[in-house]
Image: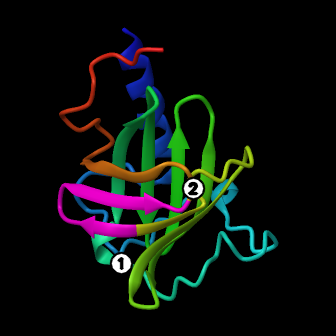
Amino acid sequence: MRSAAVAAGLVGALALTGCGGGGGSKAGSSASPAASAGSTASSGGSASGGVTSSSDKLQGSWITTSKGKIVALIVTGKRAGVFVTGGTVCSGTAGKEAGMEMIHLTCTDGSKDRATGMVDSADKSTLKVTWSGKLGQEAYNRAEGGKLPSGLPKTVKR
């Protein structure tokens, strides 16, 4: 029952950002995250980073679990957002920067856990990001059509 509520919340978050559509979310999409997911250049440039272009490999919705919470990473063009069950919301940019693929985020709750991430690898089903903070590397699974990917726990334990 609880995992159904979490899944419904994430599907809602994906729908709100315009990134939950099935199959057709490629770099050419004109959809953009909600206005509240705007980058904040006034924070020393960390959210805007040095991303110069989008990366086709990063496009779409990605899901992982961390510390008993579900984490959704959504990339559309050069825009990126992270939604964590429990209320953390982050927004910023993702794409190519100085020959690497990087993610730069600013979180509404001030968390720095996912402020800067370097993409270690990305393919059709898995994305690995090493965050500069204490989280280290996280592995994400692609979520198609706003659905949770297989392989995630059926229940979330506290």
**Residue at the extreme top of the image, as rendered:** 1
Q: How is the image coloured?
A: rainbow
SS state under label 1? loop
**Residue extent of the magenta highlight:** 119-132
State the mark number for residue 133: 2
Q: Nearer the viewer, residue 115 or 108?
A: 115
**Which residue is at 62% across, 40% downward?**
88
Q: Is residue 127 magenta?
A: yes
Q: Separation of disc 2 and disc 1 at Cα?
A: 23 Å
Q: Nearer the viewer, mark 2 or mark 1?
A: 2
- Residue 6 spot, x, y in % from top left: 43, 24
- Residue 104 spot, x, y in % from top left: 57, 68
Instruction: Give the prevailing secondary structure in the magenta stretch.
Output: strand
Q: Nearer the viewer, residue 17 or 6?
A: 6
Q: Nearer the viewer, residue 52 or 10?
A: 52
State the mark number for residue 55: 1
Q: Is residue 3 magenta?
A: no
The answer to whether 66 appears left or right of 42 in the picture is left
- Residue 79 spot, x, y in % from top left: 52, 68
**Which residue is at 38% across, 27% downward?**
7
Marked residue nearer the N-terminal end (2 or 1):
1
Quadrant of the rendered image containing residue 30:
bottom left
Q: Amino acid at mark 1?
A: Ser
Quadrant of the rendered image containing residue 45:
bottom right
The answer to whether 39 appears left or right of 7 in the picture is right
**Which residue is at 29% across, 35% downward?**
148
**Residue at the extreme right of the image, as rendered:** 42
So how many labels did they put on this image?
A: 2
- Residue 113 spot, x, y in % from top left: 59, 50
Q: Amino acid at mark 2?
A: Gly
SS state under label 2? loop
